[in-house]
Image (cartoon, rainbow, N blue to C red):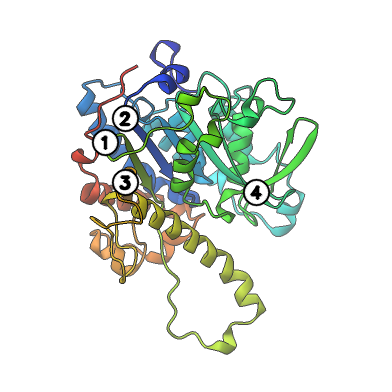
């Protein structure tokens, strides 16, 4: 089940040659909480169907570049291949229990990635033979993972003009299986075994992109869309997309956040085990907010929750440049008692929806996502020209 019938597909080559305003979409990591972001995307899709007058209109018809990390990578790949939001949601509802099956440490250590449940489901959805450079991908797609072998973040896209996407290169990234790249992006340490991918004649070990600076990949996507070094194989006039608030829209969708406030914490409690368990999530939370902050500094924020009490939401703010480089909308939910109450979901247990593997919380996550969409997604956020194949 890969994408749409041929006659309905947008051809990536034609899209890249277009001079229409560019629309970019980024989805955070967050495990099963991806269901929350899908409710926001469902409302965006509904608005675009109304705007286009086409019942078969998809997010891939509107967005030119889609980025995702971890669970956001699954969603982004689904969008890029022309799937409807309902189809992607069905994947989560049908396979969530298998994808996030709890295993003992011993079983996890013995797991082989080829037989691991999530790998099998991704093969079925995206096709075992579908590659990063396959025509089934209707948009540019950015997936983020961490190369544990080289100890480096690995943002990879299907941009045909990228250096390592040259078909003449012996290790052309476009030949890598799409399902395997998505699986690598979702390989959260302690949840799933790592993914081994051979690039040319070299095997590399990959883990979840959420343990890089790009659990929220929005600003990295902007850089890869506009910096000419990412378009090194393109003609000079096509190296990087044109910026401007009338030429570029970036939409960033979160999977819910929750700062780990603990006012009863004492210094003597911060021992080795405490730091080992708390520091990774603290760094991920800080990195996610930094990507959001950068987008609001360099972009014109038209929607977004409070960043912090000092700088607020930064709507109408001035940045270091004389002009903003794009319009920016950020949709997310604060999964705290106060945040849930503000969404009309005060009866939801915050602890249950904060977990990345809480299958039992799927219904609540859908409800929260719908509340975010109802409060914050507006038709005027998407008044750019509709891309018609």
Q: Disc 2 to disc 3, how far (Cα)?
A: 14 Å
| SS class, disc 2 | loop
Q: How many marks?
A: 4
The mark nearer the N terminus, 1 or 2, is: 2
Q: Which residue is mark 3?
A: 328
Q: Is residue 20 left or right of residue 280?
A: left
The residue indicated by pointer 2 is 21
On residue 195, the disc is none
Please identify the residue farthest to the top as the structure is shown: 7
Position in image of residue 314 (x %, y %)? 28, 59
- Look at the image and tell me whether residue 94 can be seen: no
Q: Residues within 10 Å of mark 2 (few under 14, many from 20)?
A: some
Q: What crowding class fits label 4: few (fewer than 14 Cα within 10 Å), some (14-19), or many (20 or more)?
A: many
Q: Position of residue 113 (x, y in %)?
A: 70, 41
The residue to which callout 4 is attached is 207
**Distance of label 1 from label 3 (alpha carbons):** 11 Å
Tag 1–tag 2 contact (CB < 8 Å) = yes
- Secondary structure under badge 3? strand
Q: Residue at left 65%, top 57%?
A: 190
**Foreground disc of the pair 3, 4:** 3
């Amino acid at each position: 089940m890969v994408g749409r019938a041929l006659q309905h597909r947008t051809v990536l080559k034609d899209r890249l040659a277009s001079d229409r305003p560019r629309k970019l979409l980024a989805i955070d990591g967050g495990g099963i909480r991806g269901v929350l972001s899908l409710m926001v995307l469902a409302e965006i899709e509904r608005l675009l169907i109304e705007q286009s007058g086409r019942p078969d209109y998809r997010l891939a018809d509107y967005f030119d570049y889609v980025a995702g990390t971890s669970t956001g990578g699954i969603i982004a790949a689904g969008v890029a291949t022309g799937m409807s939001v309902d189809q992607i949601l069905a994947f989560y509802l049908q396979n969530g229990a298998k994808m996030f099956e709890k295993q003992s440490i011993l079983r996890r250590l013995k797991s082989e990635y080829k037989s691991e449940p999530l790998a099998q489901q991704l093969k079925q959805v995206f096709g075992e033979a579908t590659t990063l450079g396959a025509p089934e991908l209707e948009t540019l797609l950015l997936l983020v993972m961490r190369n544990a072998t080289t100890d480096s973040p690995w943002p990879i896209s299907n941009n045909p003009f990228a250096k390592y996407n040259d078909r003449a290169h012996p290790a052309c990234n476009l030949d890598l299986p799409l399902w395997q790249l998505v699986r690598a992006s979702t390989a959260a340490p302690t949840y799933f075994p790592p993914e081994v991918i051979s690039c040319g004649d070299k095997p590399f070990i990959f883990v979840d992109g959420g343990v890089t600076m790009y659990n929220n990949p929005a600003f990295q996507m902007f850089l890869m869309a506009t910096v000419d070094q990412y378009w090194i194989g393109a003609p000079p006039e096509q190296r990087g997309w044109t910026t401007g608030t009338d030429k570029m829209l970036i939409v960033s969708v979160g999977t819910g956040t929750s700062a780990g406030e603990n006012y009863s914490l004492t210094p003597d409690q911060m021992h080795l085990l405490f730091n080992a368990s708390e520091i990774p999530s603290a760094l991920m939370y800080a990195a996610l907010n930094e990507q959001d902050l950068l987008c609001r500094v360099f972009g014109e924020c038209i929607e977004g929750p409070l960043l912090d009490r000092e700088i607020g939401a930064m709507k109408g703010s001035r940045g270091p440049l004389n002009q903003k480089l794009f319009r920016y909308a950020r949709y997310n939910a604060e999964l705290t008692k106060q945040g849930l109450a503000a969404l009309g979901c005060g009866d939801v247990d915050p602890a249950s929806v904060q977990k990345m593997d809480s299958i039992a919380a799927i219904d609540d996550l859908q409800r929260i996502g719908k509340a975010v969409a109802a409060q914050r997604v507006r038709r005027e956020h998407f008044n750019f020209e509709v891309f018609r194949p």
